[in-house]
Image: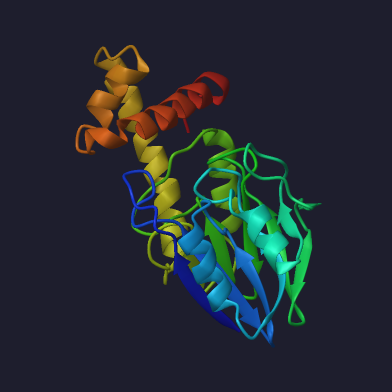
Amino acid sequence: MRIERVLAPNPGPFTGPGTNTWVVSVEGEAIVIDPGPRISSHERAITEMLTGQRTVAVVVTHGHEDHAPLANSLAAGLSVPTYGYGPAPDFDPDVRLVEGSEIKVGGKALQVLSTPGHSDDHLCFRLDRVLFSGDHIIGGSSVMVEDLGSYLDSLRKLAPLDLERIYPGHGEEIAEPKKTIDWYIAHRLRRETEILAAMAAGASSVAEIVEVVYAEVDSSLHPLAAVSVAAHLRKLEEAGPE
């Protein structure tokens, strides 16, 4: 099995160095995971990476604009189906995936894990002891969360897996999966404690909480932080603190 990255030329405060497109090759067959934004130079780079192999699928972890829009046109050019959770504004999969679905590549099975939280349509993919994590887990940073309860459940679902490597949607590959997953869980619970403390000190709106809890974070990322804070507040209202 060979795993190669094609880095999309879409760096920015929300995407880091850019979106990681992963080309996974097994016994002469290949799949593309998260083709990314609709950028012609990126599409050419992916196509060149696939030269000499039989491409069998284009797969999407979730429908966000930095992961999915290129999928349908890339797949059409390769004459292969697209796979994903469901339609998004710039993506409509040929095959809809659910927990337990499998995609065959070179005699191996790419297993589908439903991991909502970052978005309600988010999927991770497991191949042997490797996980393709999309935006559920990324290299070198935490992620924006839309539904905190679901996100923590999804992290705890992954924690027992025997993984040796995680290939994320942004940032470098992760060599210590269990340690990283545990950190993500602890980080979210720590943020919950900080949010409760900010509210006890008088912060009464999402914006005020962001200013206190994310004071050390670049202000350009505060809009993403606000989404996560809102998710924390919904979780606290619905389920209380952990």
Q: Indicate the quadrant where residue 151 lies.
A: top right
Quadrant of the rendered image containing residue 124:
bottom right
Q: State how many labels appear.
A: 0
Give me the residue at 68% from left, 64% from top: 77
In the picture provided, is 193 more to the left or to the right than 159? left
* Residue at 70% from the left image edge and 68% from the top image edge: 78
164 or 18: nearer the viewer = 18
Identify which residue, 161 or 20, lies in the foreground: 20
Q: Is residue 152 above or below residue 210?
A: below
Quadrant showing the N terminus = bottom right
Q: Position of residue 207 (x, y in %)?
A: 31, 19
Q: Coloring scheme of the render?
A: rainbow
Asked whether residue 60 appears in the rendered view, the answer is no
Residue at the (50%, 50%) spot, across then down: 135
Q: Is residue 49 visible?
A: yes
Percent of width and height locating residue 176: 42, 69
Q: Residue at x 23, y 33 (%)?
A: 219
Image quarter of residue 143: top left
The answer to whether 29 is drawn above or below residue 240 in the figure is: below
Q: Nearer the viewer, residue 70 or 41?
A: 41
* 47 vs 12: above or below: below
Picture coordinates of residue 139 (x, y %)? Answer: 39, 59
Q: Nearer the viewer, residue 199 or 141?
A: 141
